[in-house]
Image (tube, rainbow, N blue to C red):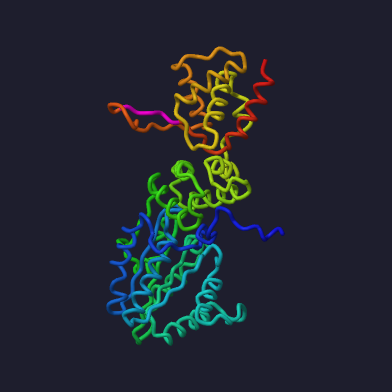
Amino acid sequence: MLFERSSVIIKDGEKLSFDYIPKDLLHREEQMRRLSMLFRSVIDYGGSETAFLSGSVGTGKTVTAKRFCSDMAEYCYKHSVPMDYVVVNCRQRSTESGILLQMIRHFDPAFPDRGFSTPEMLRTFRGHVTKSGKRFVVVLDEVDVLLKKGGIDLVYQISRFNDDYQSKVSMSMILISQEYVLDRLDESSLSSFKRANVVRFDKYSRDELRDIVASRAEIALKEDTYNQDALDLIADNSEEYGDARFAIDLLDKSARMAEERDEGRLTAEDVRGAKAMIYSVVTQSKLESLDKNRTLALLAVCRSIKNMGYVTISAAEKTYAVVCEEYETTARKHTQFWTYITDLEKNGLIKTTSQKADSGPGGHTAYISLQDIPSKVLAKKLEALLEAMP
């Protein structure tokens, strides 16, 4: 039956979801420590705090906020301190009433979505928080969407929540945005946000992305079903963006593509195929613009790399000599072949890296990789072009 076929590679697909929150966040320890320091007063004596998490897409802002709030709630529970939180995505709930509705439904899932004004909903939410007696944190993700639509007053109302009650209530807020948004707040709202409470998220480095992908593969994929150079290639493809979401999505699509084959193993070819599905810079027009010599050099790379993530320049050059003989063309010397490889890299068709050799006095070995098209697919395209050349 169609749905009875068991997975060969994927052990737990949920671990590849953007909604999955790892217990330990790799390379975001500094941001977690910073938040812990800022919100210490909330735990110790029911103070109120604000923070602004800023950084480009895929840098771990949302998952860090969720992990931090979850860890804080767990810590408070163990120490008999009542604490709770809610996370609202302002792109999905882009109006003040929509955001308040989700906040209220955290306490009352049956609360109607019509019939209440914004002030009434705000009072209802305040009533729930007060009645709960818990130290509460509101996380507004992608808050720039709300602010662009004039939602400054809601931010102000939540940030000054404690001022409106004689009873001691702890209300804290975390804002998350790719853009710097504090300068969009009015003076009244800005007074609640300390500019020093900005937590910055830089783009992940290539090695950090490699660690994240390896960690996710370990818990999501079955043992011995993926090649390490496939993970290296995912990290290489994601390095330009510094985006962990992109890297995890690429791992997910690569694994699902590998499931469709019979080998039962995720290889670099699957990564290249998955990257082509997301975004490929290898266009037909680029290939057609190559002269015969560079087309032969690229075909040699395809044939020598096969299912591997990388191939040495010397291995590709040996295959180049064979390819030239097949197409009755004189193979160029090493210097000229290297020029072809350099030109192909400038066109975004391949990528070269240099690694220290395993043996020898401090020498380095050049490696070539194909980024976002399977070698077999590219080889067929190049062979067709060569057949049409005079």
Left/right placement of residue 76 relative to residue 145 reads left
Q: Is residue 366 magenta?
A: yes
Residue 29, relative to residue 237: is it above or below? Answer: below
Measuring 53% from the left and 60% from the top, which residue is drawn there? 12
Q: Is residue 209 above or below residue 66?
A: above
**342 above or below 310?**
above
Looking at the magenta stretch, what is its main secondary structure?
Answer: strand
Q: Residue at image x 62%, y 17%?
A: 327
Q: Does residue 373 appear to the left or right of 156 in the view shown?
A: right
How many numbered marks does the figure carry?
A: 0
Residue 13 within the segment the image draws in magenta: no
User: Which percent across, then down, holds residue 155?
Assistant: 44, 70
Name the quadrant of the N terminus: bottom right
Give the residue at x 55% y 12%.
330
Task: Give the x, y percent position of residue 240.
Answer: 45, 42
| Residue 186 screen position, x and y as percent | 41, 65
Q: Quadrant of the C terminus?
A: top right
Region of the chain picked out in magenta, as a range: 363-367
- Which residue is pictured at 63% across the width and 31% down the height? 284
Q: Residue furthest top?
A: 330
Q: Quadrant location of residue 172? A: bottom left
Task: Judge by depth and name the residue closer to the eye, 140 or 23.
Answer: 23
- Residue 369: give x, y in percent of width and height: 49, 34
Q: Relative to 14, does residue 273 appear above or below in the rendering? A: above
Comparing 111 with 297, the one in front is 297
